[in-house]
Image (tube, rainbow, N blue to C red):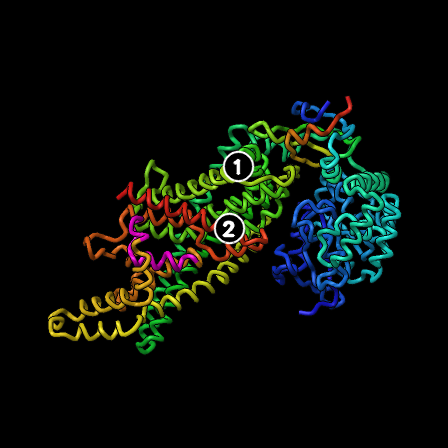
């Protein structure tokens, strides 16, 4: 399952990434395999989304969230 | 000032690095540029307990040494270039105690460069409140580095940190974090041999970043490129592997030194605030409300201090005429320089208020939420959520805003933001708008709460944003993207604004405005005064001779002087120039006097007011020293006998100022940021064309 499919309020654990370039950026921000992600909210216009990861909040676009694969 | 020790502050964004910088240096700081690039270099001085003086450099916040934007790129090059005059003797890494894991990534990278380092563990009060227990001594021992717990906001621990800075070692004693040679051992060894670097992590960083490092010679950079091909080095794969290895190390490091409360936290305050501030409906309503409040306040709160300043200068101008002997030098001082300066200084209250609001919005974390809410709309028109900050900053001044686009990683998004930012109604347009609105819009309250003049001003501001968006949309189809855009951004927790930071920003921005605009305005005032006081050939003598004739003897003295002055102005160099462009601007409703103002305004918009002051004081009789507004209100078109500044003319002028690129500093900033004359030239051309057309339509519709 992709992060972009997660509903607000639900959580998942990062399994892997489908995009190397994006993964480098996300991992530097603390979004690593094994980390738990909570989808906090979605922007008023439906994109981007705000997630909690590694103890802080990060916002990213849905398209970027779709490169993060979660454990099912 | 010569310092005994140079210290660089390094840390993630939102870790309170700037607050610490202010706490360490007080007001003893200045903003400059790093050599060759335009990233702001904030330098301050701090007195250490052992009576030495430390020079503190505040480096841009970054999450890692691998830069994502131009701002961040400066961090590694400052730390790496041992020969540069900003290379630090000591690095203070500022860590956010409430989010140690992510913060430590940057620390481990910096530490591996083997420059002496100490850790300032900031936000200890917040960490305590959140129930995070950090065993500082154990952590310090594991790292081999002094750790100083501080709270920069509460100003605690600052003396301890100064003490630690003065005791710091001259050699790096920190423990190795990870074995970097595993990522590309042969490549690292070869680069080390050939470029003469003994630090393996430094060599690895050269492999990643050599293309952007100015201190490497072309030959060195090309050699590194060859070596990379030889050892089939893949930068992104190596970065990914390094990041994972570093986080593994950090997990081990923090495992028995940091304790976090396990119990599920109740919903944080920030989340509850966000539920309202980023709400589907209320979010936008609140945002628009805040913008309207800001503009109403700029008008309302600044009127009293502005009156004081302009009255003060009118008095000074009259006083100068009184005490100094009459003559060209006195005229130049009173009507040229003092009148010109008055035109600028009067806007300090408005600029200070605007910058106070912008700094509050950024400080509280609200600006990040605006970015979050607006990203989707902005993307539709070819911009990016991050473009919101430069665009809103554009209300203050396009120059720092264009510089702040460096945080936009994507080239195309950044270029479009640069191209449209000067359309946003900046503070230099404010004087022009205020003056013209006060001339033709009645000072009335409508619907109980809105001032009609304030509403007209708000309309000009809204129009500027709308035009920026439309132009951005056009550029979206013209420019070709160079790389994929992305938007990964931290949403910092809400904090109350730091009032001394707000005050500092008000002070610094106003000072910069006065110094930059002041120079231009004094120069322009003098040139303009000379050009309007002297004429080509013997025209002035002929005018004098003409009025000597018998038929003028019957006219009262006052009237005669006015006739002579008007005739002289029209025949002066400035008048000649104004007349030369009059045919082109007549369809816009402008006469040759406004033409002179348009020409001088191409240096800077706010010169308009000073120009008007100069032209009308040369024109009128010198004893009556009214404010510019009174003079303009009384200006009569000699052909029609009607006032010059009708509603049509005033609005046509405002349209011209809204769209025209009349700012030499912006042109220079765009050139610096894009490193090509092509962009400022395109910008100047499209904006001038837009200004002409908008002005033409406005005048023809309203006249």
Q: Is residue B585 located in the magenta-colored stretch of the structure?
A: yes
Q: Position of residue B517 (x, y in %)?
A: 47, 60
Task: Give the vertical position of B592 relative to A4 (above or below).
Answer: below
- Which residues are the magenta region? B584-602
- The chain to which mark 1 is attached is B
Q: Is residue B87 located in the magenta-colored stretch of the structure?
A: no
Q: Residue at x 69, y 23 (%)?
A: A10
In the rendered image, the quadrant that contains the N terminus of chain B is bottom right
Task: Give the vertical position of B27 relative to B652 (above or below).
Answer: below
- The chain to which mark 2 is attached is B
Q: Secondary structure at mark 1?
A: helix
Dot placed on the residue nearer the N-terminal end, 1 or 2: 2
The residue pinned by badge 2 equals: B398
Mark number, residue B477: 1
Number of labelled discs? 2
Q: Nearer the viewer, residue B266 or B87?
A: B87
Q: Position of residue B135 (x, y in %)?
A: 83, 44
């Amino acid at each position: 399952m992709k992060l972009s499919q997660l509903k607000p309020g639900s959580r998942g654990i990062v399994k892997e990434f489908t995009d190397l370039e994006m993964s480098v950026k996300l991992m530097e921000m603390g979004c690593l395999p094994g980390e738990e992600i909570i989808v906090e909210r979605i922007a008023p216009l439906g994109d981007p989304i705000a997630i909690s990861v590694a103890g802080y909040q990060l916002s990213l676009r849905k398209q970027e969230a779709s490169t993060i694969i979660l454990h099912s | 000032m010569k310092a005994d020790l140079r210290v660089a502050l390094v840390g993630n964004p939102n870790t309170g690095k700037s607050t610490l910088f202010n706490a360490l240096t007080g007001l003893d700081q200045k903003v400059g540029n790093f050599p060759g690039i335009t990233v702001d270099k904030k330098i301050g001085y701090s007195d250490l307990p052992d009576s030495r003086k430390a020079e503190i450099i505040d480096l841009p916040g970054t999450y890692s040494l691998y830069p994502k934007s131009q701002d961040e790129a400066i961090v590694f090059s400052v730390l790496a270039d041992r020969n540069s005059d900003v290379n630090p003797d000591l690095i203070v890494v500022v860590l956010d105690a409430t989010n140690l894991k992510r913060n430590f990534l940057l620390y481990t990278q910096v530490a591996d460069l083997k420059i002496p380092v100490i850790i300032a563990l900031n936000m200890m009060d917040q960490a305590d409140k959140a129930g995070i227990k950090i065993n500082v001594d154990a952590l310090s021992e594991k790292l081999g580095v002094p750790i100083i717990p501080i709270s920069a906001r509460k100003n605690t621990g600052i003396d301890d940190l100064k003490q630690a800075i003065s005791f710091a070692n001259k050699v790096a004693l920190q423990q190795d974090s990870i074995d970097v040679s595993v990522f590309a051992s042969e490549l690292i060894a070869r680069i080390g041999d050939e470029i003469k670097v003994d630090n393996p992590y430094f060599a690895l960083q050269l492999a990643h970043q050599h293309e952007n490092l100015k201190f490497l010679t072309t030959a060195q950079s090309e050699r590194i490129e060859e070596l990379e091909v030889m050892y089939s080095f893949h930068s992104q794969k190596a970065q990914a592997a390094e990041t994972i290895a570093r986080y593994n190390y950090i997990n081990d490091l923090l495992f028995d030194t940091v304790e976090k409360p396990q119990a599920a936290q109740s919903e944080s305050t920030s989340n509850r605030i966000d539920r309202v501030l980023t709400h589907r409906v209320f979010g936008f309503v609140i945002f628009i409300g805040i913008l309207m409040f800001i503009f109403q306040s700029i008008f309302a709160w600044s009127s009293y201090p502005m009156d004081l300043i302009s009255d003060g200068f009118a008095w000074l101008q009259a006083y100068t005429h009184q005490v100094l002997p009459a003559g060209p030098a006195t005229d130049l001082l009173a009507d040229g320089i003092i009148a010109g300066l008055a035109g600028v200084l009067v806007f300090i209250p408005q600029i200070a208020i605007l910058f106070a609001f912008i700094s509050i919005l950024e400080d509280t974390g609200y600006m990040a939420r605006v970015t979050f809410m607006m990203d989707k709309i902005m993307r539709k028109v070819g911009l990016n959520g991050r473009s919101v900050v430069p665009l809103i900053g554009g209300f203050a001044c396009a120059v720092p805003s264009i510089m702040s686009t460096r945080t936009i990683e994507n080239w195309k998004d950044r270029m479009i933001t640069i191209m449209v930012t000067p359309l946003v109604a900046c503070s230099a347009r404010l004087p022009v708008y205020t003056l013209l609105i006060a001339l033709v819009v009645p000072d009335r309250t409508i619907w109980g709460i809105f001032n009609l003049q304030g509403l007209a001003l708000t309309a000009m501001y809204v129009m500027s944003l709308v035009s920026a968006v439309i132009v951005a949309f056009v550029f979206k189809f013209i420019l070709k993207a160079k790389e994929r855009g992305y938007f990964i951004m931290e949403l910092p927790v809400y904090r109350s604004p730091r009032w001394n930071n707000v005050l500092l920003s008000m002070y610094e921005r106003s000072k910069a405005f006065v110094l930059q605009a002041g120079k231009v305005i004094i120069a322009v005032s003098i040139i303009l005064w000379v050009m309007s006081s002297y004429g080509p050939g013997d025209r002035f003598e002929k005018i004098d001779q003409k009025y000597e004739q018998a038929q003028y003897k019957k006219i009262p003295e006052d009237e005669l002087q006015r006739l002579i002055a008007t005739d002289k102005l029209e025949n002066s160099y400035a008048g000649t120039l104004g007349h030369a462009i009059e045919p082109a601007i007549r369809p816009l409703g402008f006469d040759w006097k406004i033409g002179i103002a348009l020409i001088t305004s191409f240096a800077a918009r706010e010169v308009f007011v000073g120009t008007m002051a100069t032209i009308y004081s040369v024109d009128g009789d010198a004893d009556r020293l009214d404010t510019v507004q009174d003079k303009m209100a009384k200006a009569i078109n000699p052909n029609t006998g009607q006032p010059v500044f009708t509603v049509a003319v005033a609005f046509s002028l405002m349209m011209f100022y809204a769209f025209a690129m009349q700012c030499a500093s912006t042109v220079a900033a765009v050139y610096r940021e894009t490193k090509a004359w092509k962009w400022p030239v395109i910008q100047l051309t499209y904006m001038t064309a837009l200004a002409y057309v908008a002005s033409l339509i406005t005048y023809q519709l309203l006249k």
